[in-house]
Image: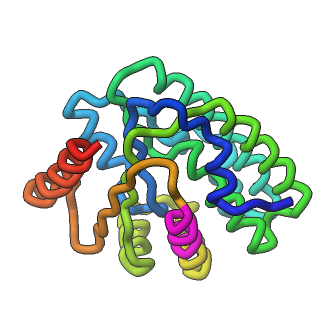
Amino acid sequence: MKVSYRELLQKVNRERVYDMIVIEGVVGVGKSSLMNILGEKGYIEFEEPVVDNPILDKFYHDRARYSFPLQVFFLNKRFEHIKKATTVTNAVLDRSIYGDAIFARMLNLNGEMSDEEFGIYQELLENMLEHVQAPKLMVYLEVSVDEAMRRIHKRGRDYELIVERAYWEKLNAEYETYFGEYDLSPILRINVDQLDFENNQEDRTYVMGLIDEALKQL
């Protein structure tokens, strides 16, 4: 049986809080850049496994064929990352196991992951979530579809450039659904449509100020 994001998050143990910040957002929004900036401030970085990923390129060329193995690959790596992140102080994660279901559910709703595959994925995710705690802060980088696509084209990864606009629209909508139900930790929403914190020092100072203020409120 498919469950809501809120029901999935109820699987997470909330008895204590991990000393970590999680950065979430759609493809191209700037998660890795923000993680790197926090890394410069002394945070221990845990990158999303996209560089040495043997399936990601294949997935974008044939989503129905590779959606399930890709999501299992990501889920396994994110579980590994969060276990390692709990052994350090001030960890920062570029995506995490908490939001892993966003892509899987979108692909299932889109008919690109079968109900049987999604059921197996969901059961595996639930088993893992029972062994993790909540993060201290979730940072959600919001962006319009137009701006996300502009950044994706600027980045120029071949396998992302072949993706149709409808895919990015559905992904953005799924993120909004997820964060409409997210109740696991304090959340900081930052709209980055007009921000370039990677290259603009004023924007960087602004975003870091928002994060510092959010941490003070914990």
Q: Which residues are magenta?
A: 171-181
Which one is nearer the viewer's eye here, 113 or 153? 113
Asked if residue 58 lies left or right of residue 190, the reply is right
Give the residue at x 85% y 54%.
119
Colouring scheme applied when the structure was drawn: rainbow
**Residue 32 shown in magenta:** no
Toward which corner of the image does residue 75 lie, by quadrant?
top right
Q: Is residue 174 above or below residue 42?
A: below
Give the image location of residue 160, x and y in percent.
54, 64
Which one is nearer the viewer's eye here, 18 or 161? 18
Q: Is residue 162 visible?
A: no
Give the image location of residue 149, x and y in percent.
43, 74
Give the image location of residue 46, x and y in percent.
44, 33
Give the image location of residue 86, x and y in percent.
48, 24
Give the residue at x 21% y 62%.
196
Q: Quadrant of the N terminus?
A: bottom right
Asked if residue 77 lies left or right of residue 58, the reply is left
